[in-house]
Amino acid sequence: MKASATKKNGILHFYFDGELDEHAARLIRRQTDAFIDDNAAKFNYTDAEGNEAEYDIVYDASAKVWSVKQMTETYVYDRYASPSKEHWLGTDTNGMDMLTRLMYGGRVSLIIGFIVVAIEGSIGIVMGGISGYFGGWVDNLIMRIVDVFYCLPSMPIIIILGAAMDAMRIDSWTRMMYLMLILGFLGWPSIARLVRGQILSLREQEFMLATEACGIKVWHRIFRHLIPNVIPQLIVTCTMSLGSTILTEATLSFLGLGVKYPFASWGNIINDVNNAYVMTNYLFIWVPAGICLLITVLGFNFVGDGLRDAFDPKMKR
């Protein structure tokens, strides 16, 4: 059971986390009020069945909230166990199987990478398509917005937002959603510039003059005739961006500002190496995650290079 209390105008307001009958709630309110006034750090509570439990009173000065918590002990077995038949890559500081965490961490890292690239691509295609087709003041306005985004220090912004989410104690799943949205929102300008440049060279060609002569709607001209011609270049750019996005997520998770426990990612697996002793004596904790990260990023970069060469007519003989 957990409870929190906020004192306003000398009156304590209680909030209970979990099921509690009214009689027990009144007793805890009365006892906690007295102990808070006495600046006590803990107190004992005996329920109607005679079971006694010790509770700690913790005061958060920034939020002006007292938290009443019951401490529990957790025993962890097989900490830093060496690779064996039961655990092929050993276990981490929490006794968790490293091979399982690597697989789950790879899934999380790849999901974040694909979703971030999808967000970047969606915003970049729309903004770049509108900018390149209409030109004039629309093009100038969108390009100035792109310039502003290029001037933003992305990493400090992400670090500040990560620290803010730590202070607000946002749960791991919501935090991961915010991380994907932030990375996607900050990464679209490069794709918008690419799409704009391609459309500027395509909109004066004969097939576009034919679409105008046929009276096709503007949005159909952009998204059914111009954008498909930019897809090859977009695929190359997005593939290259996928590797850098996974690397960015791993960096943030390593710094403790990305994916949080209990979710696993390759970055926060490496983050488990929190001192030189673990780094030098338990290589199986961080080396496999580093190798997976290296192979994945290199793989996507090689795929991007191969697609670029395949789509470039100058490379064909």
Image (spheres, rainbow, N blue to C red):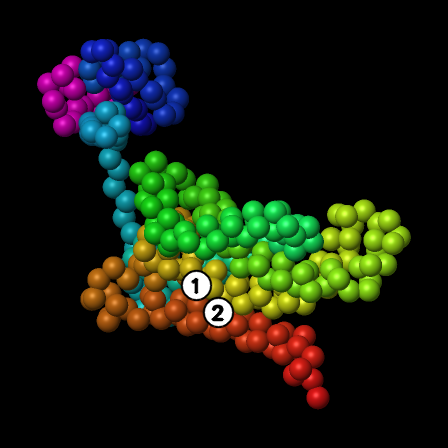
Residue 296 position in % (x across, y down): 49, 69
Please give the name of the residue rendered at 67% of the width and 75% of the height, measured from the top-left corner: 311
Q: Which mark is residue 247?
A: 1
Please give the name of the residue rendered at 58% of the width and 72% of the height, measured from the top-left corner: 304
Q: Is residue 213 above or below residue 170?
A: below
Indicate yes or no whether the magenta region holds residue 12: no
Residue picked out by circle 2: 297
Q: Are marks 1 and 2 in contact (CB under 8 Å)?
A: yes
What number of labels is visible? 2
Q: Is residue 18 above or below residue 166?
A: above
**Relative horizontal placement of residue 4, taking residue 136 as reference (left or right):** left
Please give the name of the residue rendered at 63% of the width and 74% of the height, measured from the top-left corner: 307
**Residue type for callout 1:** Leu
Residue 1 position in % (x across, y down): 32, 27
Stretch in magenta? 34-53
Please give the name of the residue rendered at 20% of the width and 66% of the height, measured from the top-left corner: 277
**Relative horizontal placement of residue 144, taking residue 218 as reference (left or right):** left
**Relative horizontal placement of residue 310, taking residue 146 as reference (left or right):** right
